[in-house]
């Protein structure tokens, strides 16, 4: 059951993030609630902890990128929903796939736009000052809807380890 809810949540989030650059609360919050309720009903207190720790894991993994304005709150909530449905171990492992796929997507975008070298220079310059504040919004024009990486990373982990 949680896999079906997960796939529906991922499919809707994929479409809305590409079309509108938004991951809807109308999708993520019910998925979190379903995960919490399902695991609590089926496994009691242990099920609740399983789901709740998954939510905390999803939040913890993306909080810093969100706080640095590297991604939107919808991305964080989507990973929290994944955590509620599948638990912290699944969420953490999916996150590793998500990070790799996100990096590959970003690299492809920079290569296609022929801006890899300039972007690396700006990042190194910003790192020297230990802040991303020196990067203007115009310099972040290569940003992409990270929900795409979350969806593909989660599905990749699911396909490799669950099927």
Image (spheres, rainbow, N blue to C red):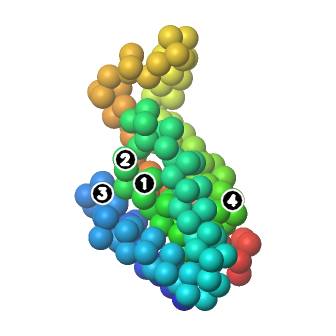
Residue found at x 55% / y 11%: 128
The residue carrying pointer 1 sits among few (fewer than 14), some (14 to 19) or many (20 or more) residues within 10 Å by Cα, namely: many
- Cα distance, mark 3 to mark 4? 24 Å
Q: Quadrant of residue 124?
A: top right
Say whether marks 2 and 1 touch (CB < 8 Å): yes
The C terminus - image quarter? bottom right
Residue behind mark 1:
75
Residue 47 x, y percent position in the rendering: 63, 78
Q: Which mark is residue 22?
A: 3
Say whether marks 2 and 3 touch (CB < 8 Å): yes
- Cα distance, mark 2 to mark 4? 21 Å
- Cα distance, mark 4 to mark 1? 16 Å
Is residue 11 in view from this perspective?
no
First of labels 2, 4 by sequence position = 2
Relative depth, front residue between 108 and 143: 143
The residue carrying pointer 3 sits among few (fewer than 14), some (14 to 19) or many (20 or more) residues within 10 Å by Cα, namely: some
Is residue 81 in view from this perspective?
yes
Say whether marks 1 and 3 touch (CB < 8 Å): no
Residue found at x 66% / y 57%: 92
The N terminus - image quarter? bottom right
- Cα distance, mark 1 to mark 3? 9 Å
The residue carrying pointer 4 sits among few (fewer than 14), some (14 to 19) or many (20 or more) residues within 10 Å by Cα, namely: some
Q: Is residue 61 left or right of residue 12?
A: right
Which structural element holds mark 4?
Answer: helix
- Residue placed farthest to the left in the image? 20
Residue 27 x, y percent position in the rendering: 35, 71
Q: Which mark is residue 93?
A: 4
Which structural element holds mark 1?
Answer: helix
First of labels 2, 3 by sequence position = 3
Q: Is residue 127 left or right of residue 28?
A: right
First of labels 3, 4 by sequence position = 3
Residue behind mark 2:
72
């Amino acid at each position: 059951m949680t896999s079906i809810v997960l796939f529906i949540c991922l499919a809707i989030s994929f479409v809305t993030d590409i079309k509108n650059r938004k991951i809807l609360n109308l999708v993520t919050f019910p998925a979190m609630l379903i995960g919490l309720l399902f695991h609590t009903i089926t496994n009691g207190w242990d099920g609740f902890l399983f789901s709740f720790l998954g939510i905390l894991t999803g939040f913890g993994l993306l909080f810093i990128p969100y706080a640095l304005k590297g991604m939107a709150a919808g991305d964080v909530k989507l990973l929290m929903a994944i955590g509620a449905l599948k638990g912290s171990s699944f969420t953490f492992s999916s996150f590793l796939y998500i990070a790799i796929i996100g990096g590959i997507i970003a690299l492809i975008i920079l290569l296609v736009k022929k801006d890899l070298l300039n972007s690396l220079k700006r990042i190194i310059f910003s790192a020297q000052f230990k802040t991303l504040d020196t990067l203007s919004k115009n310099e972040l024009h290569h940003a992409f809807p990270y929900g795409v990486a979350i969806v593909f990373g989660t599905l990749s982990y699911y396909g490799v380890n669950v099927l």
